[in-house]
Image (tube, rainbow, N blue to C red):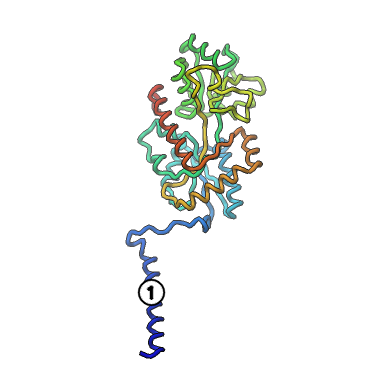
Amino acid sequence: MTARRRSLVRRDAGVALVAFGLSCALIGPVWGQTAPTTAAGEYPAHPVRLIVPFSAGGASDVMARLIGQRLGERWNQPVVVENRVGAGGNIGMEAVARAPADGYTLVLMNNAAATNAAMNPRLAFDVTRDFAPIALVASTPMMLIAGSTIPATDLASLTEYLRTNPDRQAYGSCGLGGPQHFAAELYKSQTGVRVTHAPYRGCSQALADVLAGQIGLAMVSANVAIPQVRAGRIRAVALTARNRSPAALEVPTFRESGIASLRDYAVDVWYGVMAPAATSPEVLARVGADVRQILDQPEMRQKMAAAGIDGLTGDGRELMALLRADIETFRRVVRFADIRLE
């Protein structure tokens, strides 16, 4: 064989191998192979949706817009915040669970996902299985507030008053099955007090009825109550969080009440970023790293504090551990209070 002939054979063989490789790449999905997910270095190549399962204006929405704006600046791609409301957050969560696992649909969720899982084991999705946790981002403590009709100044005296006057008071919450409802029922289960639950359609409505004297007590998000507490219109009894809030350092926690059964009491509304379960680990790591860097910025912390939101940072493993722990705690509350879906 001549040198020219050998050269032509090698060239033709090389072309054939390249063609074979391209054909395999093109028909791979037909054979049931999984197409490669977006590489972190290429992500994101187009706009990202950040779903909020709640209405505009709440803490979840505020956090999503603060984070989304800064992620968009980092990525040079728009991050579009989309409010998908309904069913206590379940509609938005289900939409994300069913979205393509390509990193272009994320959710800013809160632990209403844990109360929903505790109340309804027949949801269309499993929050611990159908989502990939990315990062913890914030928390908002809840506050037990009292109006002028309640003759108690702190949690210890309130608990004693409720014990000696069973079933004579009612407390408002921000809605049936919400974190505020569960926080109050956990308090009842650990102290033995008997007080009737009055669910409202939102924290603001519960607060308004305490201000008007229509109801004596309410468990609401702290950021909703703080302005009225500082104006002297209502009393802050205690915060539900493990530690005092920077937004209201003067208000003690349930754990600080001196009541032995409450020494380990801690419940707050926490917020996290998640994605559909099969999202690439590289993309999850990229989003998580960028979110944590954003949360470390002093300007970001100031904006959160101004909105009554506390920082609570952690990685995906910490987010999932907190979610699982809340589901177990809230299942116990469901059994104690016999909470049923309407």
In the picture, measured across the screen, residue 19 lies left or right of residue 254, that is left
The spot of residue 26 in percent (x, y) is 39, 66
**Residue 213 versus residue 15 in the image, above or below:** above
Judge the density around disc 1: few (<14), some (14-19), many (≥20) Cα neighbours within 10 Å: few
The spot of residue 105 in percent (x, y) is 48, 49
In the picture, measured across the screen, residue 229 lies left or right of residue 183, that is right
**Residue 315 versus residue 334 in the image, above or below:** below
Q: Which amino acid type corresponds to the residue marked 1 in the rendered image? A: Leu
Q: Quadrant for the N terminus, please.
A: bottom left
Using the rendered image of the protein, determine whether residue 122 is visible from the camera's viewpoint.
yes
The spot of residue 257 in percent (x, y) is 55, 18
- Residue underneath mark 1: 17
Which residue is at 43% across, 44% downward? 131
Q: Nearer the viewer, residue 36 or 147?
A: 36
> Which image quarter: residue 305?
top right
Q: What SS does tag 1 mark?
A: helix
The spot of residue 238 in percent (x, y) is 57, 22
Which residue is at 41% across, 49% downward? 278
